[in-house]
């Protein structure tokens, strides 16, 4: 949506209160390993308009021109960060490929229902111009440029950095940072406070082959938050989260552009940390949510972590949502008291501990019995809840179940053979609480050429994890 000349909305609350209901979503679909060298990944358009005759249907598929890409996350060429620039339009979806190191640019503006490929940045450009690989998170900047985080060097060893892309020509301009760092993954910036914070997954050579606990001991996965000077492009602080903060993935500042705090989900430790700036200007972090591991039999390890793989905040900064991919639940916490989140909603959606499966839980600090299997429209929920996306009004949460193909194959092989699924959860935005919509299901096991794994969800009009607001767009002085 364009308002007042530029893309997006003037403020997070404006988006929440006046944003149009989503009618379409875009989701990258990844080809299983057995077919990946002969079939390309593709982007689907799914109709999510309850009034439409094609509701809950895939209405378009845009196949990439190459194979073995591993499409993953996506982002926009423009968002609310350039709301005050009438020359900008949210009309290109950026699709980085984690395995091939390629970046696709998709035209969604000509026909939102049927996106078409515009151009691409090839792997050799990533190598020659930036010395980077494994591109991941995309954010549009207030300048009109696009920034993408990267996780490796050209050989696939760990290396954190950022690629700066021209928002009009879609060519690489340069590396953003002055010096690369140990690891990369996600990032979020707050120009009003001259800060950006990035997180750490691990070495591409390690995570591309699946999860090996020994790689954690060998230091191939991260456990730190990296604080950057936004104007100088320099890291100014590294916050070590320790053993309780292993593999910090998705990071979210509060949507309020003046906020100096936010949250990050740590996958392997299954904790949520709050980070904030202290009065002396130094940044710090503290654990505010702890998901206990479960003692189990017939699983890879004797202690099963929840594995928090995605988190997001409602646009009014009242609720935080996250998924426990291995345990199988999605949680909603009221974060009105930032230091003491309160659990107000929980939905079970598959997972590794459901009753009737091979795993037996022998000790559980939260549950008295293993969850029942879940069926939607007569079909068993496969895998566990992974990527989540909240509607602008906060009333609908979309959920997919694929994490990364090698990890899917390791922990939920049924996703490889039968495909992943898309679900919708109804959210109580007044009192808190969530309910699975039993009438909504998109099963990617039904795809024409065979099962695929669907990953991150995006709306054409922006969402809770793509848009960043600058203080200037909500009436403050531009820095």
Image: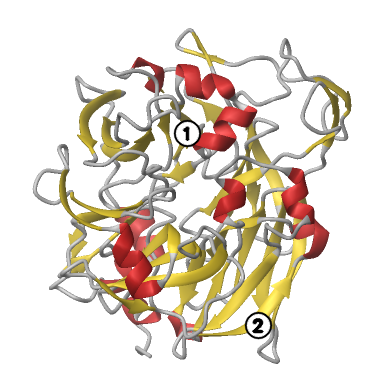
Q: From the image, tell me which residue sits under label 2.
A: 237
2 and 1 marks in contact (CB < 8 Å):
no
Q: Among all residues in the image, which is located at the extreme top?
A: 378
Give the x, y percent position of residue 166: 23, 73
Residue 335 appears in the figure: no
The answer to which image quadrant residue 308 occupies is: top right
The answer to which image quadrant residue 451 occupies is: top left
Q: From the image, tell me which residue sits under label 1.
A: 400
Q: Secondary structure at mark 1?
A: strand
**Is residue 431 positioned above or below 121 on the image?**
above
Left or right, 381 with reference to 240: left
Which of the numbered marks, if any, corresponds to residue 47? none
Give the x, y percent position of residue 462: 32, 54
Mark 1 Cα within 10 Å, few/some/many (few <14, many 20+)?
many
Front residue (pair 284, 234)? 234
**Is residue 51 positioned above or below 10 on the image?**
above
Q: How is the image coloured?
A: secondary structure
- Quadrant (top left/top right/bottom left/bottom right) for the C terminus: bottom left
Front residue (pair 108, 453)? 453
Front residue (pair 171, 393)? 171
Give the x, y percent position of residue 142: 31, 76
For the point 82% across and 39% down, the residue is: 293
Residue 91 appears in the figure: yes
Give the x, y percent position of residue 149: 45, 65
Mark 2 Cα within 10 Å, few/some/many (few <14, many 20+)?
some
Instruction: Tell me the mark number nearer the camera, choosing from 2 and 1.
Output: 2
**Is residue 145 positioned above or below 452 on the image?**
below
- Quadrant (top left/top right/bottom left/bottom right) for the N terminus: bottom left
For the point 26% across and 63% down, the residue is: 77
The answer to which image quadrant residue 132 occupies is: bottom left
For the point 43% across and 28% down, the residue is: 32
């Amino acid at each position: 949506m364009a308002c007042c000349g530029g893309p997006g909305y003037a403020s997070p609350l404006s988006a929440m209160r006046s944003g149009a209901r989503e009618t379409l979503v875009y989701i990258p679909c990844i080809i299983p390993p057995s077919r990946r060298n002969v079939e390309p990944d593709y982007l689907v358009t799914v109709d999510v308009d309850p009034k439409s005759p094609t509701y809950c249907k895939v209405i378009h598929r845009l196949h990439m021109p190459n194979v073995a890409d591993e499409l993953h996350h996506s982002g926009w060429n423009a968002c609310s960060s350039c709301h005050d620039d009438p020359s900008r339009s949210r009309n290109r979806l950026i699709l980085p490929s984690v395995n091939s190191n390629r970046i696709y640019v998709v035209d969604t503006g000509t026909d939102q229902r049927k996106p078409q490929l515009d151009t691409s940045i090839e792997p050799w450009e990533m190598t020659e111009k930036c010395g980077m690989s494994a591109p991941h998170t995309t954010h549009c900047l207030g300048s009109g440029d696009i920034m993408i985080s990267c996780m490796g060097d050209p050989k696939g060893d760990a290396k954190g950095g950022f690629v700066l892309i021209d928002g009009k020509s879609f060519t690489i301009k340069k590396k953003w940072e002055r010096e690369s760092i140990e690891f990369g993954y996600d990032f979020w910036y707050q120009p009003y406070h001259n800060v950006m914070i990035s997180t750490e997954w691990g070495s591409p050579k390690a995570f591309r082959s699946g999860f090996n606990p020994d790689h954690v001991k060998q230091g191939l996965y991260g456990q730190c938050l990296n604080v950057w000077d936004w104007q100088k492009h320099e890291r100014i602080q590294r916050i070590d989260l320790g053993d309780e903060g292993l593999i910090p993935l998705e990071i979210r500042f509060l949507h309020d552009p003046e906020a100096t705090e936010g949250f990050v989900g740590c996958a392997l430790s299954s904790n949520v940390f709050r980070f904030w700036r202290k009065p002396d200007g130094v940044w710090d972090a503290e654990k505010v949510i702890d998901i206990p591991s479960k003692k189990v039999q017939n699983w890879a390890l004797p202690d099963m972590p929840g594995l928090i793989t995605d988190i997001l905040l409602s646009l009014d900064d009242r609720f935080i949502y996250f998924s426990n991919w291995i345990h199988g639940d999605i949680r909603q916490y009221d974060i009105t008291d930032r230091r003491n989140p309160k659990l107000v909603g929980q939905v079970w959606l598959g997972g590794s501990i459901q009753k009737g499966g091979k795993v037996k839980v022998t000790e559980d600090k939260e549950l008295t019995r293993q969850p029942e299997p879940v069926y939607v429209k007569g079909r068993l929920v496969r895998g566990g809840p992974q990527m989540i996306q909240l509607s602008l009004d906060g009333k609908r949460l979309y959920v997919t179940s694929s994490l990364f193909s090698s990890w899917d194959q390791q922990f939920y092989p049924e996703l490889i053979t039968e495909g992943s699924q898309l679900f919708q959860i109804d959210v109580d935005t007044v009192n808190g609480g969530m309910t699975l919509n039993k009438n909504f299901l998109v099963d990617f096991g039904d795809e024409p050429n065979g099962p695929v794994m669907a990953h991150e969800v995006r709306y054409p009009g922006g969402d809770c994890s793509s848009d960043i607001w600058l203080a200037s767009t909500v009436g403050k002085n531009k820095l």
